[in-house]
Image (cartoon, grey):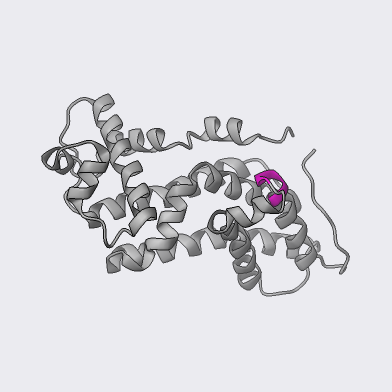
Amino acid sequence: MERPSLESFTARHHLDSRSLCAQIVEAREGAIAVRSAGAATDNLTRIIEATLRLANRKGFAAMTLRELARESGLSLGGLYAYIGSKDELARLIQSWVSRTLRRVMASALADIETSRMRLATAIEAHLLTTEALREWFFFLYMEAHHLASDERRQAVAAERNSEQIFADIIRQGQSEGRYGAMNADIAAGLIKAMLQDWYLKRHKHGERGLDVTAYADTVTAAAEALLDASGETTTTTHS
């Protein structure tokens, strides 16, 4: 199986801000009162990208809608055609990050049967998705404590759902005799922490000369060493 590049993976799964905003518009999520889907997509993209910039610069809690309108180039009235409140905006980002990761992981793992290849593929798919949408994932992680209670619960549930994918793969490997008898949920949490470290501390890994593909190989090797039933380190590679 040919290994995907970041560019081909991003194009295949539509992992860019405009594509996600087009999906939001199509689903009629939020208070989008604009008839032209193309114009609505363009403006919603400007709004969300401006949100991510401002949140990174000063924090989402400190950001005002007036500042967001100015940063996005829209009037305050124009902004309200797309979002009714900051909570609604945060909910849009949270929900679409979660559903996008679920969609991509399910697609990447389709028709892959062995636990070892499923683990390597899941790790790579998760990393490529967060690399393509790094600002979205960074926002959600850093601003989760500012979300309203319902959105906070949904963010926690989304993280647990993604961990469950890895836990299920680990249990499959245990049933196949490939992985040792350790707690699959704890192991999945350790793998998830390594995956999050990529987009939270990307500069650190860049200084070490790692790109996303090399980091995927490193995480896969570490996960296999942790899980290997024989106690011998086995590196899984894509062929």
Image position, residue 31 (x, y; %): 18, 43
Residue at (28% x, 37% y) in the render = 44
- Left or right for 166, reference 97: right
Image position, residue 183 (x, y; %): 67, 74
Note whether residue 71 is visible: yes
Residue numbers of the magenta segment: 211-215
Instruction: Indicate yes or no whether the magenta region holds residue 26.
Output: no
Give residue 29's quadrant in the image: top left
Give residue 204's quadrant in the image: bottom right
Residue at (71% x, 36% y) in the render = 3
Image position, residue 67 (x, y; %): 22, 49
Residue 22 sits above or below residue 219 on the image: above
Residue 10 sits above or below residue 166 on the image: above
Judge by depth and name the residue closer to the eye, 210 or 1: 210
Image quarter where the N terminus lies is top right
Residue at (76% x, 67% y) in the render = 226
Image quarter where the C terminus lies is top right
Instruction: Indicate yes or no whether the magenta region holds residue 214.
Output: yes
**Secondary structure character of the magenta stretch overall:** helix
Residue 131 sits above or below residue 145 on the image: above
Residue at (66% x, 54% y) in the render = 205
Give residue 8's quadrant in the image: top right
Image position, residue 160 (x, y; %): 49, 64
Residue positioned most to the left = 77
- Left or right for 196, reference 87: right
